[in-house]
Amino acid sequence: MRYVYPHYYHDFACTAGDCPDTCCAGWQIMIDDGSMERYEQYVGSFSERLAKGIDWNGGCFKQGKDKRCSMLNDDNLCDMIINMGENHLCRTCKLYPRHVEEFEGLREWSLSVSCPVAAHIVLSCEEPVHFTEENDDDDDPLINEFDDFDFLLFTELEDAREVIYKILQDRSHTIDERIRYLMELGKQLQTCVEENRISDMQDIYREFAKAQDAGTLAELCDDDDLPDLSDPLQRYDFLQENFSILLKLELLRDDWQEVLTAEKNMLAQGRTHYAQFREAFVKIMETQDWWPVFLENYLMSFVYTYFCGAVYDDWIDTKIMLGVFSVVFTEEFIMNEWLAGADAQAAAGKPAISRDACEKVAYRYVREVEHSDLNLNALEEFLHAVLFSPA
């Protein structure tokens, strides 16, 4: 078995009651079958409270006011840990915010940006993200789950992702330029899959790697169908065309509606007004050295977590666009918070929004998307159908 981790993975430590936004509220915490059996058999002074706090039919913990887990007390501490010990936690609670993607003979671990502490670790990392690997002689316990696993496609995806990392971490280009290069690469790789030319994928990503070394990536990305997100008017059109899906997703926290409403109001002002606000925001954020690195790390987290999952559904460009879509809209939500009702002229003189505030917007967005399988699936299906994948 191989195990892969981003270099900062082991830096995480839960802050428990000191967390600025507990993970034990706002989403349905599902309980794995093994833990359900242990809870059903548990005897002790906490057994009655435990039994009342579980939805036995739904296989999850019940929720109280503000969608707080039934085990979460007023001090934002877990009564199960206090009374039973950490070893009794279900798989979800034991792992979070650690996340694992499973492939035959390989486990790729990451930290979910939906956790405030993990978000800070991931998004504030100044050095380019790199990965460490561990190996053991154990057989894959899920080997029977991978009967139809396409090793050829997966190998190409892994190699292509290395090229994506290299392009994405090339700080000689703006983040919008890098995004455009990745969209073009994803589109070309998707064509190979659609035309059953898997073996041709390496020619494409090798060409991109060679162009990246030569500084000629722009020559590979002259497709007028791809939006130039550095152009405020093209960016507005991209936002207007794709914002609707966010309004259709399951709302996990009521206060997220305020974020969506702010973006809806921004887009309602039209292209010209949007361009004025966007230009003011870009100008002020260009003074912040950490800002492009923040966006780079954010997009890296999506690429690392989801890109190779295309081995299961063949949606290569959709995986790239999941990250692009998320980065673009999160940046918009950050801009709206920065504006806070100012007009374009007043906005031009406002100080930049803090990195802490940006991290908060990012982890709130990821919670709304990642903490609901319905939302994540709906977003991917939308991107597959509407953006760049053939219907």
Image: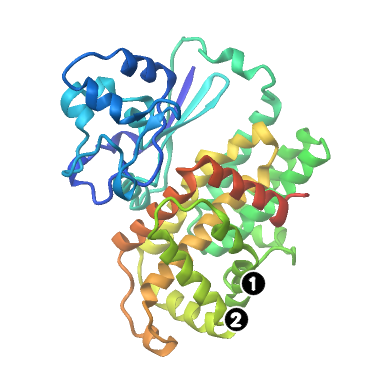
Give the quadrant of residue 130.
Answer: top left
Find disc 2 in the rendering and name its residue.
271
| Residue shown at the point (28%, 36%) measured from the top left | 70
Q: Secondary structure at mark 2?
A: helix
63, 207: nearer the viewer:
63
Residue type at mark 1 is: Asp
Answer left or right for 306 relative to 43: right
| Residue shown at the point (65%, 32%) measured from the top left | 311
Tell which residue pokes out farthest to the bottom in this image.
345
Vertical side of 176 occupied by 158: above or below: above
Mark 2 surroundings within 10 Å by alpha-carbon count, few (fewer than 14), some (14 through 19), many (20 or more): some
Find disc 1 in the rendering and name its residue.
237
182, 254: nearer the viewer:
254
- Labels 2 and 1 touching (C-beta < 8 A): yes
Residue 34 screen position, x and y as percent: 40, 16
Answer left or right for 87 relative to 389: left
Spatial CA span between label 2 and label 1 = 8 Å
Residue 216 screen position, x and y as percent: 65, 59
Q: Secondary structure at mark 1?
A: helix
Vertical side of 40 occupied by 108: above or below: below
Dot 2 or dot 1, earlier in sequence: 1
The answer to whether residue 339 is visible is yes
Answer left or right for 113 relative to 108: left
Count of marks, rendered view: 2
Residue type at mark 2 is: Arg
Residue 379 screen position, x and y as percent: 59, 50
Q: Which mark is residue 93?
A: none
| Residue shown at the point (49%, 48%) measured from the top left | 369
287, 111: nearer the viewer:
111
Tell which residue pokes out farthest to the right in this image.
195
Residue 110 screen position, x and y as percent: 42, 36
